[in-house]
Image (tube, rainbow, N blue to C red):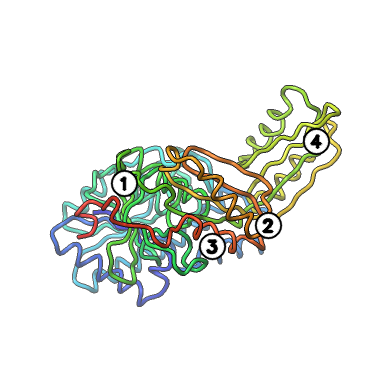
């Protein structure tokens, strides 16, 4: 059994003791337990703020050295709490466990998990507490896995250990059809397919890190998203057969961490888009929505979106490329947001896009950009209208009436 507890679950001493009791109760069923823990509460945010007080652009390697300390505090405290409950436990860093990554600081990817140390400790009857979010590269430098990286740590360990299950404990009791803080009538999903969950996570649902879902799908790791504060079955993330995709849309997400960039009057010739987006890629800036508008005078406008975090660097890069290309201007707009619908069932149901656009039109909500895939539709809109847009789209697809019995989760998921 692999269990992962997020920062809110271990935010203070009492919550750590509560997690310890839950872990010990699981251990007492006779199953070996590996626990992955995030940094306490807002520790990571505080460390990032402190770093920027020292340096406006701190080196990524040193940021990894700094940020990895948050999880080390959590694992030591949880190991102490578990021992106070009468069980043996040992805390281990990512390096001690054998989580090997590439050298991409602050965004590292796991390349290998060496399980010898964990298996040895489990064979001695100990509960193993692992620092999430971190690993070590070929130079023995500490690396971190990006926001939400503890989810990926847990999934990688579950895959390497061939765990019976991987439980992700957080401050919500599952995956919902929308953010309940925005849509009070949102429903908890009993199950969701890997592909749908990957889109939901990528489009703003912060319950799981997208990379963790991708890793789970690749290795067949079934995930249970549950609350560490209340008992309940949570949501199962698993492989789903085509016959089970009776639900056209499973959820509505929104993302405010979006900024729009427009390069005006770019010469309309081959290679221009490559030159622009290759420059961004070399600086590891992810581009999401892309729209090209051709004009009559052999010129085009290129519109795309990046995260607001990446906007300052993206603008510098784009302005340099725009000068080389002879574009007339680079415009930016951080006051936008993205609302999306996700559902594998929409592949076989026409009219889904029309219904979404109709719901936005009825509210007088203007759409700047549209992007689609087989199982999602995203619209870029004004940020000030995003919560209204989520509510209108949720209502248009009647997700508050979602029948959770259409395709029940496996029995062990609700045991």
* Label whose residue precedes the other's in the sequence (4 or 3): 4
* Label whose residue precedes the other's in the sequence (1 or 3): 1
> Circle 4 sits on which residue?
322
The circle on residue 382 is 2
Relative image position of residue 8 (x, y in whole percent):
42, 68
> Circle 3 sits on which residue?
391
Helix, strand or loop at disc 2?
A: strand
C-alpha distance separating marks 1 and 3: 27 Å
Helix, strand or loop at disc 3?
A: helix
Q: Quadrant of residue 415?
A: bottom left
Of tags 4 and 3, the one toward the viewer is: 3
The residue shown at (32%, 38%) is: 242
Relative image position of residue 414 (x, y in whole percent):
23, 59
The residue shown at (55%, 64%) is: 45
In the image shown, does 182 or 111 lie closer to the viewer? 182
The circle on residue 238 is 1
C-alpha distance separating marks 4 and 3: 39 Å
Badge 2 crowding class, 10 Å Cα cut-off, few under 14, some 14 to 19, many 20 or more, is some
């Amino acid at each position: 059994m692999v269990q992962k507890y997020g920062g809110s679950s271990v935010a203070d001493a009492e919550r750590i003791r509560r997690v310890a009791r839950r872990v010990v109760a699981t251990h007492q069923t006779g199953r070996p337990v590996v626990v992955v823990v995030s940094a306490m509460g807002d520790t990571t945010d505080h460390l990032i703020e402190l770093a920027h007080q020292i340096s406006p652009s701190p080196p990524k390697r040193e940021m990894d050295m700094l940020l990895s300390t948050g999880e080390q505090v959590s694992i030591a405290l949880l190991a102490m709490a578990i021992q106070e409950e009468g069980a043996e436990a040992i805390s281990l860093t990512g390096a001690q466990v054998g989580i090997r990554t590439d050298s991409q600081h602050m965004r590292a990817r796991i390349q290998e998990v060496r399980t010898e140390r964990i298996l040895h400790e489990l064979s001695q009857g100990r509960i193993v507490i692992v620092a999430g979010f971190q690993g070590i590269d070929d130079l023995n430098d500490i690396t971190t896995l990006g926001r939400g990286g503890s989810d990926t740590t847990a999934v990688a360990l579950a895959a390497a250990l061939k765990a019976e299950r991987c439980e992700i404990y957080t401050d919500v009791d599952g995956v919902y059809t929308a953010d309940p803080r925005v849509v009070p009538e949102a429903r908890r999903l009993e199950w969701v397919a890997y592909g749908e969950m990957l889109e939901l996570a990528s489009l703003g649902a912060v319950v799981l890190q997208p990379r963790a879902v991708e890793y789970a799908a690749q290795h067949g790791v079934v995930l249970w998203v549950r609350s560490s504060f209340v008992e309940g079955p949570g949501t199962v993330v698993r492989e789903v057969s085509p016959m089970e995709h009776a639900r056209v849309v499973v959820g509505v997400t929104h993302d405010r961490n979006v900024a729009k960039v427009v390069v005006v009057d770019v010469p309309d010739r081959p290679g221009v888009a490559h030159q622009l987006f290759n420059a961004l890629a070399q600086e590891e800036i992810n581009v999401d929505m892309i729209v090209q508008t051709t004009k009559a005078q052999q010129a085009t406008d290129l519109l795309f979106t990046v995260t607001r975090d990446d906007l300052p660097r993206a603008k510098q890069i784009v302005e340099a490329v725009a000068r080389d290309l002879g574009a007339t201007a680079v415009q930016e707009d951080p006051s936008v947001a993205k609302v999306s619908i996700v559902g594998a069932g929409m592949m076989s149901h026409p009219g889904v896009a029309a219904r979404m656009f109709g719901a936005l039109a009825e509210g007088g909500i203007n759409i700047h950009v549209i992007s689609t895939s087989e199982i999602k539709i995203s619209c870029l809109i004004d940020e000030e209208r995003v919560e209204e847009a989520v509510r209108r789209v949720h209502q248009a697809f009647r997700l508050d009436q979602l029948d959770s019995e259409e395709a029940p989760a496996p029995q062990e998921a609700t045991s």
